[in-house]
Image (cartoon, rainbow, N blue to C red):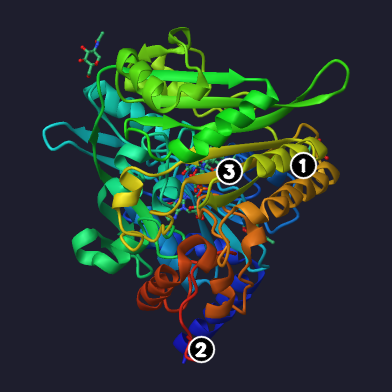
Amino acid sequence: MAVPILSLFLLFISIKSSANNITNTFIDCLNSFSEPTFPINGTIYTPDNSSFSSVFHAYIRNPVFYNSTRTKPSLIITPLHVSHIQAAVICAQLHGLQMRTRSGGHDYEGLSYLSYSNTPFFILDLFNLRSVDVNIEQETVWVQTGATLGEVYYGIAEKSNIHGLPGGVCPTVGVGGHCSGAGYGNMLRKYGLTADCIVDALLVDVNGAVLDRESMGEDLFWAITGGGGASFGVVLAFKFKLVSVPPQVTFFNSKRTVERKIIKIAEKWFHVAHRLDKDLFIRMSFDVSTDRKGIKHVHASFPSLFLGNSTRLLSLMDDSFPELGLQDSELVEMSWVESALVYAGFPVGTPIETLLSRTQQPGRDRPFKIKSDYLKNPISKKGLKFIFKKMKELPNQMITFSPFGGRMEEISEFAKPFPHRAGNLAMIEYETYWNELGTEAAKKNLEFARKMHEHMTPYVSDNPREAFYNYRDLDNGVNHHGKYSYEEGMVYGIRYFKEVNYNRLVMVKTMVDPNNFFSNEQGIPAFQSSDDM
Ligand SMILES: Cc1cc2nc3c(=O)[nH]c(=O)nc-3n(C[C@H](O)[C@H](O)[C@H](O)COP(=O)(O)OP(=O)(O)OC[C@H]3O[C@@H](n4cnc5c(N)ncnc54)[C@H](O)[C@@H]3O)c2cc1C
Ligand SMILES: *[C@@H]1O[C@H](CO)[C@@H](O)[C@H](O)[C@H]1NC(C)=O
Ligand SMILES: *[C@@H]1O[C@H](CO)[C@@H](O)[C@H](O)[C@H]1NC(C)=O
Ligand SMILES: *[C@@H]1O[C@H](CO)[C@@H](O)[C@H](O)[C@H]1NC(C)=O
Ligand SMILES: *[C@@H]1O[C@H](CO)[C@@H](O)[C@H](O)[C@H]1NC(C)=O
Ligand SMILES: *[C@@H]1O[C@H](CO)[C@@H](O)[C@H](O)[C@H]1NC(C)=O
């Protein structure tokens, strides 16, 4: 008789404690599910741990979210071993907790560490899992997703000066978000997206199983190479095929300040930048400065990378784009890995070890809002004048055009979830950076960013107005918890992926995570029987 009473008593205690303090029972679960040789409890930060706040803030890359009123994590787990990820995924579901995976924390909307839902959640923070294993014979590299792009570029350059990886230009960006969300950079005209180079992956799925490309199948592999990892599982590592780079590349960043001339150059840029030799990537950026008399001027800069020497570059520019007036004195030859730093804004000669730094670059640590667009047709002189006028009216605007064409046109829009391939002259990035902290300044500047984007409507893609998934922007639509439907997901899904790819992502999601454990404000919904597809 004593036994049932005792177990009833224990049951009562455990129900009471789980209602009062879910964290404790969750931590017990984590301890019981992880391998004794790799104890998990040294990786768990509760809010009363004195390091909780610094661990939480270490990878918040947009200060807008420092004092956010959104739901903050109840716990942070910093795995040291794959079994810790498996335990987190299993125990979270047993205890009704949600989870956000964070790699580099660069998400423009903070989706890897904050939530709009009231359901308690924890962060699975992968910064400890950052190995980079280069295999030069195979010309491949296995990278754990907690690594930064800088660590990957550095790791490749340690082994070879004629191999590289096409990827983003900011060295602190994390592999997990960047590569699962497509990833683009200054070699895309020659080699396509970062995701185009992924040849294998390791993923912890909703059951806590570790899958590689073969065991996950081609549909799920397709989904996590451009559709974002966050809706499908936890990507532990990616394997990339390396690309060839010459031992010396050529960098330049021409600045032009006379508006009349800028318009002439830009008109030509819209016609040639996507048609130039694939070795050449010429970006075009506009921003505004105010002179001593208080008059505003648009300035242009052309940060560029050429996969060849300066002699060949100059003759190429003479033939195809003389309007820029590129001078020999503007060119700097350097190794590809050095160009990764210089392109990111570091001075020529900066030691390449700087790629390993996880501290954000000066100027990048200010609050910001980013939006994106795709350009299908050249913008006319009249259009440019209108855009410049609006840039001068609205504070803090910078607009950057990244040319497409080349390799991007050769890859089908269905090959990866990223659909913006042939037919796009360029991708547009709108950056609004400001100096003042606090919600008032944020609100004002968010409005400036939205207005600029609205003014651009006549010049960019429509129906759908396409956007870049890695430039997360909640203005594209939000999937509210409890009403996580196909229709709601379509609002942003169609902009990021277009309809065919969105439908395939929903199909994969329905197959691998029908109960939507891996969710966020812009996740891919699972198809419900009540949905009308
Ligand atoms: C300064 C700056 C420069 C940038 N430059 C470029 C650029 O040149 N090119 C470009 O393409 N993009 C660029 N981006 C955008 C960047 O690619 C995205 O923000 C990307 O998602 C960041 O990845 P992360 O791992 O750092 O972010 P996180 O905030 O950690 O994650 C982003 C999203 O991915 C999910 N996620 C992260 N890791 C995993 C994982 N291991 N498994 C499953 N899901 C995961 C998160 O849950 C979240 O939804 C830039 C961003 C910043 C802030
Ligand atoms: C829950 O447990 C955690 C971990 O021991 C502790 O830090 C926290 O204070 C507890 N919260 C409550 C409400 O008891
Ligand atoms: C960590 O785990 C070990 C083994 O499971 C356990 O004995 C110990 O009490 C745990 N420590 C904490 C702080 O939870
Ligand atoms: C905070 O958590 C870490 C990781 O679990 C642990 O190593 C450390 O001892 C904790 N510190 C405090 C003050 O509780
Ligand atoms: C520059 O590159 C071209 C073509 O790749 C090559 O023929 C030429 O010799 C190179 N010039 C120098 C100065 O290295
Ligand atoms: C966050 O709030 C604190 C305290 O009010 C303030 O000092 C700090 O500047 C704020 N940080 C940001 C980035 O807004």
Q: Give how far apart the Cα atoms at labels 3 and 1 are.
A: 16 Å
The mark found on residue 216 in the picture is: none
374, above or below 220, in the image: above
Residue occupying the point 56% across, 67% down:
463
**Amino acid type, label 2:** Asp
Is residue 357 toward the left or the right of residue 473 in the image? Answer: left
Residue occupying the point 61% across, 50% down:
110
**Few, some or many C-alpha atoms within 10 Å of disc 2 (few <14, some 14-19, many ≥20)?**
few
Disc 1 or 2, which lies upstream in sequence?
1
Is any part of residue 130 visible from this angle? no
Q: Identify the element where label 3 is drawn.
A: strand
The mark found on residue 390 in the picture is: 1
Q: Are marks 3 and 1 in contact (CB under 8 Å)?
A: no
Q: Identify the element where label 2 is drawn.
A: loop
**Amino acid type, label 3:** Glu
**Few, some or many C-alpha atoms within 10 Å of disc 1 (few <14, some 14-19, many ≥20)?**
some
444, above or below 165, in the image: below
CB at mark 3 closer than 8 A to ligand 1?
Answer: no
The mark found on residue 429 in the picture is: 3
Residue occupying the point 26% across, 27% down:
245
87, above or below 486, in the image: above
Disc 3 or 1, which lies upstream in sequence?
1
- Closest to the observer, 188 or 80: 188
**Few, some or many C-alpha atoms within 10 Å of disc 3 (few <14, some 14-19, many ≥20)?**
many
Where does residue 65 sit, x and y in percent of width and height? 69, 46
The mark found on residue 532 in the picture is: 2
Residue occupying the point 72% across, 37% down:
388
**Amino acid type, label 1:** Lys
- Closest to the observer, 119 or 95: 119
Q: Give how far apart the Cα atoms at labels 3 and 2 are.
A: 34 Å
| Residue located farthest toward the right when viewing the structure as drawn | 293
